[in-house]
Amino acid sequence: MECSSFVLEKTAQSESPEFLRHLASCAGCQRDLEELDDLRTLYRSASIERYRGGVPRVRRRGWGSWLSAGAAAFAMIAALVFLLSHAPGGPREGDSTTSKSSAPFYRIALEAWRGDLPFDRAVDDCWRQLDTLERSR
Amino acid sequence: MDDLIKGLKAGSSEAFERLVREYGDRIYRFSRRLAGERGAEDLTQEVLVRVFRAIRTYEPTGRFESWLFTIASHLAVDLARRRRPEASLSDVEGGLSADRFASGALEPVESLEEEERRRALLWAVEGLPLEQRQVFLLREEAGLSFKEIAEIVKCPLNTALGRMHYAMEHLRKALKTHGMQ
């Protein structure tokens, strides 16, 4: 076994009897090992930075979250299919200025959520703005 | 350790906090030396979150540290390959002094020479070729055996030993160049 192999053994910390016998009689390996130990000690005293990021917020993705995500995706697709199947598909009656290729605005009934006064006003504002936009097209 | 793993598997937030407390510093230093200072905290958080999410797939056939640092190593090497570590000597200087004084590990009167040696060593570690640095850090920071390291790095045991040997040689020469050993 060559000296470098002995040093590798030391690196791996598998101190075989053969290695220990050789070490006792080889000044080169003794010096190498002392240097390696010094390096290790020095590194351990130098590498002392602390993690300061705190505990990350995490929610494990369990079956529950996958199910709720799936349900939400299904509901969105169903709503989209419903809207497309009930879309006017063309210009409104009496609107001769709207071309057939322009996409119509879809009105969704929001009455179910109405009742609260500020929300009511916000919905009415939206409709007004949509009407203005439609008229300007 | 078993309690920690059981707690993590059960999704306990206390166990997750313990994981951060016990492994946060080591993962941070490992990530910082492997992928650079910038983003090391984010990377540490990502490792911790991934460990928490993937703990159900962990089979206690090997050591927990080995499994944990497999995740850390893959993420850090991936980041390091995408960009070179930006850590400059000034980064090392600032971080070192602040942390050491804060932890009380360094007396203000401690010799400047000793502090210089530490800085030079960290600088040299960050300058090692990526493959050698990975093996060195898995050994010295993560505390893994060479068999575990070879499995993580997916190379023969002798290759892992050889990389460590070259890393040590590099570091020794770097310190000698600085006239510090």
Image: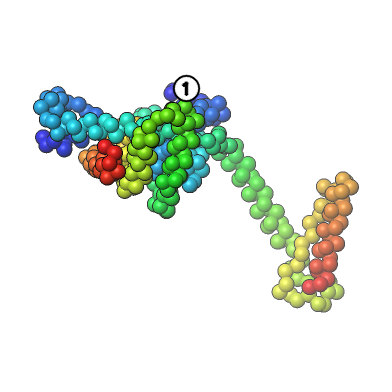
Q: Give me the residue at 43% from left, 41% from top.
A: B93
Q: Label 1's element?
A: helix
Quadrant location of the C terminus of chain A in the rendered image: bottom right
Q: Quadrant of residue A129?
A: bottom right
Q: Give me the residue at 45% from left, 30% from top.
A: B108
Q: How is the image coloured?
A: rainbow
Q: Where in the figure is residue A64, as x and y percent of width and height? A: 60, 37
Q: Where in the figure is residue A134, as x and y percent of width and height? A: 81, 69
- Along the viewing direction, whichever of A60 and B113 lies nearer the viewer: B113
Q: Give me the residue at 71% from left, 74% from top.
A: A101
Horizontal side of residue B91 vs B62, given as left or right:
right
Q: Is residue B154 in view from this perspective?
A: no
- Along the viewing direction, whichever of B135 and B69 lies nearer the viewer: B135
Q: Amino acid at mark 1?
A: Asp
Horizontal side of residue A109 vs B47, given as left or right:
right
Horizontal side of residue A86 vs A57, given as left or right:
right
Q: Where in the figure is residue A123, as x and y percent of width and height? A: 84, 54
Q: Is residue B85 above or below residue B53?
A: below
Quadrant location of the N terminus of chain A in the rendered image: top left
Q: Is residue B131 above or below residue B58?
A: below
Residue under numbered circle 1: B3
